[in-house]
Structure formats: C-alpha cells, structure tokens
Amino acid sequence: MKLFIERIKGFIKYKDLMIQLVSRDLKLKYRRSFLGYVWSVLNPLFIMVVQSIIFTHFFNRGIANYPVFLISGQLLFNFTNISTNQAMHSITGNASLLKKTYLPKYVFAVSKVASCMIDCFLSVGALLIVMLFTGATFSYHLIFFPLILVQCFVFNVGLGMFLGAMNVYFRDIQYIYKAFTTAWMYATPLFYPVSALPYNLEFIIVHFNPMYSYVQQMRCLTLYNCFPDPLMVGMGCGFSLIMLIIGTIVFTKTQKNFILYI
C-alpha cells in the first residue's frame, strides 16, 4: 500500500511532465498527416470492414450485427496490443534522457499507455458510425464505456511496466511478446463467439483471459444493451489490479540498474 501511495504522489508531482509526454506522443503519431486525428476513426473502421468481409462467412452464424460484434472487441484489444508494445520500449527509447537527468522512470511507460488510451477513446467514433449504419440500438448503457476503459488502462499500465522492465535486461522479450500477442488475439473471441469453442477451452478463456472480460463487458454495452454482469466486472477489476501489482513490484525492484543496461 505504501508503494502505491508513493506512486500516486509521484504522479501528482510530475503531472506536467506526464502531460507533455502524452502530448508529444500524439503529435509524433500524426505528424505530417493531412487527416491527423481523423485516422483514429478511419483506421479501425477500415480494418473492421476488411475483417468483416473476410470473416462474416465463417463466424457470423448466430451472431446478431456481426460488424458491431467485431469492432467492439477490436477496439479494446488494439488498445492493449499497441499500448503495451509502446510501453515495452519506453525505457530503452528514452535512454539518452534518463542518462542526463533524474526522472521517475515509470512515467515513460504510463505516458505511452495514456496516449494510446486517448487514441482509443477517439476510436469510439468508428464504433458509433458502425452502430449507426448497421441499425444497432443506442442505449444509455454506452455512458459506462469509460469504466471499462479504466479497467483496461490499469491492466495495460501494469503489463506495460512489466514488459518495459524486462525489455531492458532481455531484448528478446520484444520478439517473444509479438508472437504472444498473435496467439492472444486468436485466443480472445474477437471474430467468433466463445460458445463455438470446446467446453474445456471455453472455460480457460472465460476464466483466465483478461481480454475476454473487457471485450464481453464492451459488447454488453454496444450489442446487448445491458449492464455487464457484476461477476464479469469483478473479474475485469481483479485482472487489472493483479497485473498492476505485478508490474509495479517488478519495475520497482529492477529500475535501479536500468542505467547500466540502456
């Protein structure tokens, strides 16, 4: 508990630095781009259209409004995939700055996830467009989307800090994680209903895949027009807190020697 209180105090103290890092990341992403932030909407929209055309004949049986089913899952998985990959390189990528002055090292990992969260929030525009054109029902449940985004953000911060620390010492982790996220994507019911899997595999994914709880909560708001099951919300929060604790402990115990390896 003392460790987390210190981290919160650190966030408050270095909030201006955090804002500058997030702003820098967003500006660099769309630098020299004519459409700029509009790509946050267009990119997931284009991907959804292509994948919907490809997978609609394989996985849409019994799935009402498959485009919304597809993009609801993609939105959160892409947020996790992109943010954790960027956080993994946040320490090694800022080596020159860390060697010149003292800064709390976790700020770099958290800022990467925060900038990706803003991008994810903008991407909701693509989801709303798909819902509008497919005739999906808009309900007040959509206002609870930030609660799911916060769960996913906390999970990504924990995983990002863990990967960022590991990547300093073991550069092979970036290649291992790339293969892992590919397997993780197919192990998450983004393109298919989880009920299509054998019982044993379905049990594992439902109870041990954090992304399933976040994706399923999202689909409750957008596709099923209901509030997520409290048990599902509890699982999502549990995964987030466990990953944050693991990431914080690993990062804190290893950060003293970062300067020797970057």
Image (cartoon, rainbow, N blue to C red):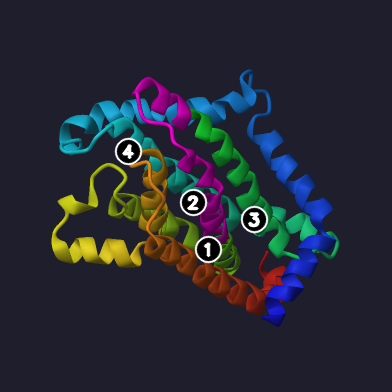
Real-space Cα distance between discs 4 and 2? Answer: 18 Å
Mark 4 = which residue? 69
**CB within 8 Å, label 4 to label 1:** no
Q: Is residue 180 magenta?
A: no
Mark 3 or 1: the one toward you: 1
- Left or right of 250, for residue 206: left
Mark 1 = which residue? 159
Q: Residue at x 57, y 60 (%)?
A: 154
Report the amino acid beneath label 1: Leu
Q: Main secondary structure of the magenta part?
A: helix
Q: Earlier in the sequence, mark 4 or mark 1?
A: 4
Residue 225 image point, x, y percent: 37, 41
Mark 2 = which residue? 80
Residue 46 appears anywhere in the view = no
Q: Which residues are magenta?
A: 127-156
**Secondary structure of the residue carrying numbered label 3:** loop
Q: Residues within 10 Å of mark 3 (few under 14, many from 20)?
A: many
**CB within 8 Å, label 1 to label 2:** yes
- Left or right of 136, for residue 245: right
Q: Residue at x 53, y 50 (%)?
A: 149
